[in-house]
Amino acid sequence: MAYIKKCKELKQVVEKEQRQPADAARIEAGHALIKSLSTQLKISLRVADTISDRIIKLMDEELWTCFCQLMHGWLEMWRVNTECHRRQGQAIAEVTAEESRQKQLAAGAATRSYADCLKGPLWT
């Protein structure tokens, strides 16, 4: 931002000099200031580039490894969860079958009891 502002100021000074001669020292000071700001800008860009490279390296080396471990753990969790639900379904099916069998046995016993009552001495 400062670089752009100083470039505009220097441009205005140069235009003003073309209309009327001005102080050469002032123009030279403006050039020096812009050169200094340009250098600072270049350094800032290099620092930003270095930081960007570090972030990319960190992502590639450390974060990607952590992400892969997280995904493997997540897949294992769902595999175990699926197996648990399969076993729960199997247990429910077995209990349901056993209850059905118990009801059939109870119904059969009740039918036999009733039939035994009919064979008793009152009906002969």
Image (spheres, helix red, strand yellow):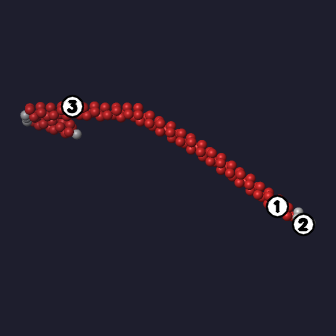
Q: Residue at label 2?
A: 121
Q: Alpha carbon of mark 2 to alpha carbon of mark 3: how far? A: 121 Å
Distance in Å between CA atoms under marks 1 and 3: 107 Å
Mark 1 or 2, nearer chain start = 1
Q: Residue 82 versus residue 40: which sits nearer the camera?
A: 82
Q: Residue 18: horizontal and vertical position, in percent?
A: 11, 34
Q: Which residue is mark 3?
A: 39
At 16% from the left and 34% from the top, the residue drawn is 33
Mark 2 or 3: in front is 2
Q: Position of residue 101 (x, y in %)?
A: 74, 53
Q: Secondary structure at mark 1?
A: helix
Residue 110 can be seen in this image = yes
- What's the mark number on residue 113? 1
Quarter of the image for residue 27 reads: top left
- Above/below status of 79 relative to 124: above
Residue type at mark 3: give it: Thr
Task: Kindly report the distance in space between the C-alpha atoms of the residues bearing marks 1 and 2.
Answer: 14 Å
The number of numbered badges drawn on the structure is 3
